Image (spheres, rainbow, N blue to C red):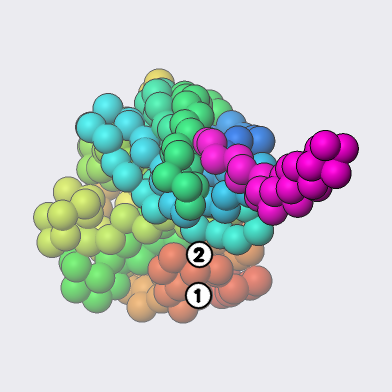
Amino acid sequence: MKSLRYILLLILVITAGCVKDAVYEGASTIKSVKLTPAAPTSTDNVVVTAVIAQGLQAPSTVTLVYNAGAGNQTVAMTGKNNTFTGTIPAQADKTKVTYKVTVVNTAGFSTVKESSYVVGDKPSDYTKLVLNELYGAGADAEKFIELYNNGDTPIKLKDVTIKKDEELTWTGIEGEVVAPHSHFAIVGAKGTTPRGFSSGFSSKKNVLIELYSPEGTKLNTFQRGEKGDGWGKVSLAAVTKSWSRCPDGTGKFMQADPTQGKANPATGTEDETVKQ
């Protein structure tokens, strides 16, 4: 009888050793989700980075869905070693963006992490905005007025105005921005381009160009010659080059080769008809 008990016990031990442990199957864990930059502005594409906890089931698909007020948009996140990224395009200032990261693992289980952010631009420092280069030679479609941002933050041009000969000739609109230490060229006179200035600009006449902030504060002036009985009525020697600040943003206006949208030379030719 004891022999039978030993035999049965031995069978149980052998059987138990042959049974495999059940593999855990369940949803993955999202350890963290972060934004880069952490405080987005309207010029920033936002990179969403999700870190997935190591587990028995690897991530199969990782998806980013965001909504910025125009319905859900889906982005496939890519990566390796359990770190995945996806990008939300730049959105307008003050836009609330909601987003969620969904992870589906190889066992078919899914997990979701949701959050949101609000786009917040820093106020534009219009004291850093200047007239930088003016080109009045050639055809009207080739003429331009260039602005320059001397500051370290973007400057929005919405409602910034330019007057030529004391008359309004250009007004900035939503979406027009000058990046830090960068140029913004307004190309084309007399309606020759969609966002040009509305009046002529001659390289052989007296002229007054004035730059104003959205609040109406005069920021900068370019003046060639004197008003007399009216701007533009007095002829001066024709100039084939542009009037450029040498160097960009801070230098005197000098005659130099046109450099629309690019850095001006360090120096140029003095022009006694231009008030500095």
Among the 4 quarters of the image, the one containing residue 160 = top left
The residue depicted at 41 percent of the width and 68 percent of the height is 260
Residue 218 rendering spot, x and y as whole percentages:
45, 30
Instruction: Check if mark 1's residue and mark 2's residue have beta carbons within 8 Å.
Output: yes
Verify whether residue 195 appears in magenta.
no
Instruction: Name which of mark 1 and mark 2 comes first in the sequence.
Output: 2
Which residue in the structure is indicated by mark 1?
A: 256
Q: Secondary structure at mark 2?
A: strand
Tell me which corner region of the image, top left, top right, bottom left or bottom right, holds residue 165.
Answer: top left
| Near-viewer residue (204 or 177) | 177
The residue identified by callout 2 is: 244
The 10 Å Cα crowd at callout 1, few under 14, some 14 to 19, many 20 or more, is many
Label 2 crowd (10 A; few <14 / some 14-19 / many >=20): many
Residue 58 in sight: yes
Main secondary structure found in the magenta portion: helix
Decide whether residue 9 is among the magenta residues: yes
Left or right: 178 with respect to 149?
Answer: left
Report, in whole angstroms, how far the alpha carbon at label 1 lies from the one at label 2.
6 Å
Specify the segment rendered in magenta. 1-27
Residue 22 picture quarter:
top right
Q: Pinpoint residue 52: horizontal percent, then vertical percent.
A: 62, 44
Q: Is residue 12 left or right of residue 196?
A: right
